[in-house]
Amino acid sequence: MKQIVLFLACIALFSCKQNKETPSEEVTQSPADTTAVKEREYAVLDSKVINNEAFWGDFDTDLGDFLHSDYNRISALVIEKTIPEIKQSIADGDLTYEDLVLFYLSRIKKFDRENDLSLNSVIAINPDVLEQAKALDESTEEIDIYSIKGMPILLKDNIDTAGMPTTAGAVAFENNNADDSFIVERLKESGALILGKANLSEWAYFFCGDCPSGYSAVGGQTLNPYGRKIHDTGGSSSGSGVATAANFAVAAIGTETSGSILSPSSSNSVVGLKPTIGLLSRGGIVPISSTLDTPGPMTKFVIDNAILLNALTGKDNADPASKKLNAPEEDYVAGIKEINDVKQFLSEKRLGYFKGSMEDTLYAQAVNDLKSAGATMIELERQDIKLPQFGRVLNLDMQKDLPDYVEKYGDKSLSQRDVKSITTFNKEDSIVRMPYGQKLFYGILADSASAKEFAAIKDTLQTNGRAFFDIPLKENDLDAVLSINNYMAGYAAVAKYPAITVSMGYQEDNRPMGLTFMAPTLSEKKLLELAYAYESISHKRKFPSDYK
């Protein structure tokens, strides 16, 4: 399928390699969409910052004692298994939490860095994770197979986590040793094991402008397991998507401003949920935009996404968006467990699909599959609604939000505390710190607006974004609209609406594609149930074959 990609979207939406429906007038041909598949040349591939020997120093003895026979036995219990399936193996005594951590660590060591299959998706390992797993194994508490307890989770490296620096992929933040973010506190309260940090597009892809998604100065170039050096990873939660797809962890947490969960999830055949703004706290997360930022779960399966979302939710009075939304408590797993008959469930749903997207054969197949399973499918014409000055929201927010993060959450010893000081620092060693330049940071510094003008820009964007969805939703009494990958992420971003993407198959060159469900504020429960129903009738996800 020929895709249209918009230049400004690379600035405003972080995922220009995949984004078709984006707010700009100028269009270019995406290099990812050439007919002939060719290996990409990257200016920088491996990290010049990570010391591989030091990276694994804490685990050499334990991994040395982890036998090939252990790996093979555990693999059958873990690879491409849901959280309930893994937890059931632990409940049955066939698997321990220590086994699980060692298995994932061995896979990361084998596949992730400095070899012909390296993916560069993991940026740090929690030095205490094995001891934490062993402590859980000593517990006599009954195991709830639908809980996150004991499950090894990777965090995008812009999420503060005690015991590991939070770098945002930038050398300037290499020693940003911060306390746990609000969502990490929630994960730990639920008993999750923080396995480590995932690589990302540096500064959440709002930094260089001309760099490939998945690149950071600290982590190097993340690569797609379905087409290493061929298919784009999507950004900016690149490492979270890649590591989840390659079975380096049970699941991962990403963050999105506009497309940064949806893009790498669809690019790597995983389930990614971008929640309603404010449902999950942004406290202790290196920001782009307090207006649009949100963390969200990235998993192999929809049920895992619901389990992880249950653990992440909670009102944070220190986050204005969380406080304002004041979302009611919800059990996202319960609704999925109640779906006993998928066809009966879908027979009661009305879904809108876009006529102009039916040229994509995978999308057309997904629409037909849902229709055949009983859903009422309504054809929609895409509205001509613009998102003017989208990129300026990011510029103007980051001017204030980044120093605010440093002051409130960052390491007190940080010398570079705002965009200007970071750009100066990077120029001191441009080859290591900014090999692709820092054009977007210069754009941040050049922008300005009065408070009144900025408020008007945001108001127009939210009004337009909501109209894009609300008009067809209300006119046709729809439960959700269907998109592809992150094509309409910009509209969902400014509307502050949730979206979830789930694998809908692969193009001829093995490039993964996602079916994306979008609906109004606080529709996460409905979206998870719809995604689960589609996943149940389609079963499109497949494991990247080179990483078995």
Image (cartoon, rainbow, N blue to C red):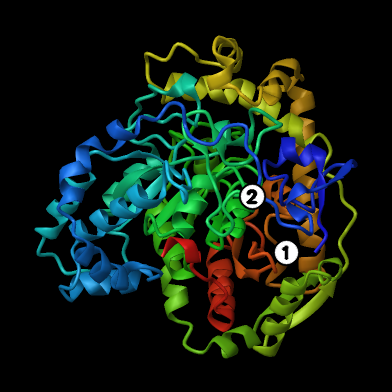
Q: Are marks 1 and 2 in contact (CB under 8 Å)?
A: no
Give the residue type that dot 2 points to. Answer: Asp
* Residue name at image x 45 percent, y 56 percent: 244
Identify the residue shown where x is 65% and y is 62%.
511
- 70 or 290: which is nearer to us? 70
How far across and how far down the image is residue 480, in percent? Answer: 69, 69
Which comes sooner in the sequence, label 1 or label 2?
2
**Residue 379 x %, y %:** 83, 75
Q: Position of residue 533 (x, y in %)?
A: 56, 79
In-front residue for pair 520/99: 99
Residue depicted at 25% across the width and 63% down the height: 71
For this view, does 509 lie left or right of residue 221?
right
Quarter where residue 85 is shown: bottom left
Q: Is residue 528 above or below residue 161?
A: below
Identify the mark at residue 483; answer none if there is no mark.
1
Dot 1 amino acid type = Ser
Report the residue marked by disc 2: 232
Query: Of the numbered discs in the image, which one, if any, rests on residue 69?
Result: none
Q: Is residue 104 left or right of residue 23?
A: left
At horizontal 13% and vertical 59% (from top left) the residue drawn is 137
